[in-house]
Amino acid sequence: MQAEPTQNELTTTLHLSLAQVSDSPAGVLDEYLATLPQADRSIIEEIAGSKDKAMVVINKGSNLGSRYLINTQGTTIGRSTTSDIFLDDVTVSRAHAVIEMNPEGFVLKDSGSLNGTYVNNVSVSSKDLNSGDQIQIGKFHMIFVSGRK
């Protein structure tokens, strides 16, 4: 015979690795910038002030601190060594995703990856990006930086 669970027996899951102080993308970017040396902060702030440039910065994963400029022809992300942003881990598909520029801004598109692409902890197939958005591909966490939107 099994006893009925009581309110005190309920459990919750705490995701410490996904905890964030700020819920807004701009707040996430500001918090990240505050942790950087002035020289690195200046480079990222220059991109954030530009309407025609964008960058992703790896803020969790083996390439921590790596910065990648997004080009106007589209930037590929994947485990293939021919990817513009090479993420060397089996959790990343060879051709995982692409970031493209359009007249309205920048768009992240999943390329049919096995493990999916996430923006701000939500699985996406295509998503318009805002500066400060957090992108997760496999075990890599990145912050998108742009002056658009």
Image (tube, rainbow, N blue to C red):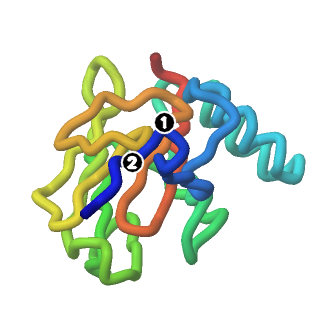
Q: Nearer the viewer, residue 21 or 70?
A: 21
- Residue 99 falls left or right of residue 146: left
- Residue 16 falls left or right of residue 43: left
Q: Residue furthest right?
A: 38
Could you tell me which residue is drawn at 21 percent across and 45 percent down? 109
Asked if residue 16 can be seen in this view, the reply is yes
Where does residue 74 sit, x and y in percent of width and height? 27, 48
* Element on which disc 1 rests: loop
* Element on which disc 2 rests: loop
Query: Mark 1: which amino acid?
Result: Asp
Asked if residue 46 can be seen in this view, the reply is no
- Residue 118 falls left or right of residue 149: left
Res 5 label:
2
Query: In the figure, 116 relative to 71: above or below?
Result: below
Quadrant (top left/top right/bottom left/bottom right) for the N terminus: bottom left
How many numbered marks does the figure carry? 2
Res 133 label:
1
Q: Callout 1: 10 Å neighbours few (<14), some, many (20+)? A: many
Where does residue 97 sit, x and y in percent of width and height? 24, 56
Could you tell me which residue is drawn at 79 percent across and 44 percent down? 41
**Nearer-N-terminus badge (2/1):** 2
Where does residue 117 sit, x and y in percent of width and height? 28, 53
Could you tell me which residue is drawn at 31 percent across and 83 percent down? 90
Query: In the figure, 103 relative to 53: above or below?
Result: above
Residues at marks 2 and 1, CA–CA distance in whole angstroms: 40 Å
Where does residue 134 sit, x and y in percent of width and height? 49, 43
